[in-house]
Image (cartoon, helix red, strand yellow):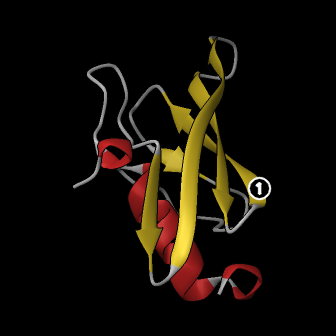
Amino acid sequence: MNENNKHTPDEKYPKSIEYKGRKITFSKLSSSDKSQNILQILKVEIDNKAFEVVEFREGLFESGYLPYSSYSSPVELVQDMVDYVPDFR
């Protein structure tokens, strides 16, 4: 595992990974919106195509690209995006 793939103690995701030949990066956009029950919003890029992933206080991650699906980690979510969303294949 290289340095970028290591999780920091306060984060639930690595800075970057590779999956099926795609370079995927994660960065934090904002945090804590109590009115919406949102813990944080992440900017995710798959081969320089950016989108947002929301982490809810319950520890679930969601994206508008995969409606009706919740994930326990953003890594699982982006792996499904690469596997199932035509824009990211």
Relative vertical location of residue 20 with respect to residue 7 in this rendering, above or below = below
To which quarter of the image does residue 18 belong?
Answer: bottom left
**Is 46 left, or right, of 16 in this rendering?**
right
Residue at 55%, 67% in the rendered image:
23
Q: Nearer the viewer, residue 62 or 3?
A: 3
Left or right of residue 17: residue 78:
right
Which residue position is annotated with label 1? 50
Q: Secondary structure at mark 1?
A: strand
User: Where's the C terminus, which quadrant?
Assistant: bottom right
The x and y percentages for residue 29 are: 69, 27
Q: In the image, 74: left or right of 52?
A: left
Q: Quadrant of the N terminus?
A: bottom left
Q: Quadrant of residue 71?
A: bottom left
The amino acid pointed to by label 1 is Ala
Instruction: Residue 15: give x, y in percent of width and height.
Output: 46, 42
State the residue at coordinates (52%, 86%). 83
Does residue 54 sit above or below 21 in this rendering?
A: above
Q: Position of residue 5 (x, y in %)?
A: 33, 48
